[in-house]
Image (cartoon, rainbow, N blue to C red):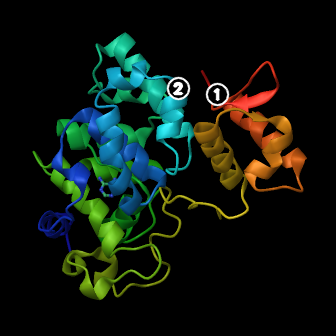
């Protein structure tokens, strides 16, 4: 089977109707892709519209107090993304006239925007023919096109080369859908997969090892949330956002580790170090000003 046959079956895919697929606004696309990186589709679908209504463009975001931005991210996890987005919005205002830039280099220069997010903005907002490569896309290309594991650079080159002319948006959304719905990491549903007849790995009878294993874009996945520092960080930030500053002596209880004050202080210090929180002169932990 050829890459061309694979491309044809990917382009024929019926896409899921997701809210961010109804816009090409670069800011809206950027926000959705940042949220989608580490938060489930269903939760992003719930939260993204309200977030954008509150901060409809880079200027609105840039002008908001940092504390509001952190509060608005509550429940989405990985709050550093909110802080980076806020800083990126400020740079868009200062350097790019209040717009999301439309070149790879300018996007990559913004905080929190890596190769995945930069290409997602280029393909989904500006129809630039680049391959949007995340874990899911890497898996799809390794199995479907190469039939063997791919290194990151190799996967990115392959992804960029596969985008059909004028179809950057559709192609990349379809590849992501294929990975989410059929070409799953564990237990791919090849029997039902619309690209099956053109898939290199399926065509070879799915010989082990699975090409997805060892494909470089594959992430390690999220670590367990319950009992993690991440969970405590989230609890602290949510508390500061809703109740205001908390005395150091209360942090262990707020973080959910009543017996481990040292851990709570260490995690609080981490938040302060990242700019997600600050100590007040009274020694309370607070959101940034
Ligand atoms: N995951 C990352 N980007 C996505 C998108 N645009 N649609 C669905 N899932 C995604």
The local secondary structure at tag 2 comes to helix
Q: Is residue 116 above or below residue 134?
A: above
Q: Which residue is at the far front?
A: 243
Residues at circles 1 and 2 in contact by the CB criterion of under 8 Å: yes
In the rendered image, residue 179, in percent from the top left (x then y), is placed at 34, 67
Above or below, comparing residue 226 to residue 189 in the picture: above
Name the residue carrying label 2.
Answer: 66
Query: Tag count in the figure?
Result: 2
- Quarter of image, res 276: top right
Quadrant of the rendered image containing residue 129: top left
Q: Quadrant of the N terminus?
A: bottom left
Taking the image as shown, residue 66 lies to the left or right of residue 107, namely right
Going from N to C along the chain, the mark reached first, 1 or 2, is 2
Q: Is 41 displayed left or right of 152 in the figure?
A: left
Q: Is residue 281 above or below residue 134?
A: above
* Residue 105 placement (x, y as % from top left): 37, 26
Q: Residues within 10 Å of mark 2 (few under 14, many from 20)?
A: many
The front one of 17 and 15 is: 17
The answer to which of 5 and 85 lies nearer the viewer is 85
Report the image quarter containing ligand 1: bottom left
Camera-side mark, 1 or 2: 2
Q: Answer left or right for 250 relative to 87.
A: right
Residue 275 image label? 1
Label 2 near ligand 1 (CB < 8 Å): no
Using a 10 Å C-alpha cutoff, classify the residue at mark 1 as few (fewer than 14 neighbours), some (14 to 19) or many (20 or more).
some
**Mark 1–mark 2 distance (CA, rounded to whole Å):** 9 Å
């Amino acid at each position: 089977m050829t890459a061309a046959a694979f491309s044809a079956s990917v382009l024929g895919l019926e896409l899921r109707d997701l809210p961010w697929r109804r816009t090409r606004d670069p800011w809206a696309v950027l926000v959705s892709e940042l949220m989608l990186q580490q938060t489930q589709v269903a939760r992003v679908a719930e939260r993204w519209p309200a977030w954008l209504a509150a901060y409809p463009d880079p200027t609105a975001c840039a002008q908001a107090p940092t504390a509001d931005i952190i509060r608005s991210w509550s429940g989405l996890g990985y709050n550093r993304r909110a802080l980076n987005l806020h800083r990126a919005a400020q740079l868009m205002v200062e350097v790019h006239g209040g717009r999301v830039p439309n070149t790879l280099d300018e996007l990559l220069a913004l905080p929190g925007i890596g190769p995945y997010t930069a290409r997602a903005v280029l393909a989904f907002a500006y129809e630039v023919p680049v391959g949007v490569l995340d874990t899911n896309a890497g898996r799809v290309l390794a199995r479907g096109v190469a039939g063997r594991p791919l290194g990151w650079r190799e996967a990115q080159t392959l992804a960029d080369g596969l985008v059909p002319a004028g179809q950057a948006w559709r192609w990349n959304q379809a590849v992501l859908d294929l990975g989410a719905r059929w070409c799953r990491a564990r237990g791919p549903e090849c029997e039902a997969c619309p690209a099956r007849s053109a898939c290199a790995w399926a065509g070879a009878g799915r010989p082990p090892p699975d090409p997805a294993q060892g494909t470089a874009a594959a992430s390690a996945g999220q670590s367990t949330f319950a009992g993690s520092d991440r969970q405590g960080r989230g609890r602290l930030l949510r508390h500061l956002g809703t109740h205001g500053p908390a005395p150091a002596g209360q942090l262990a209880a707020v973080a959910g580790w009543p017996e481990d004050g040292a851990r709570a202080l260490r995690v609080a210090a981490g938040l302060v170090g990242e700019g997600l929180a600050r100590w007040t002169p009274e020694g309370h932990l607070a959101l940034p000003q």
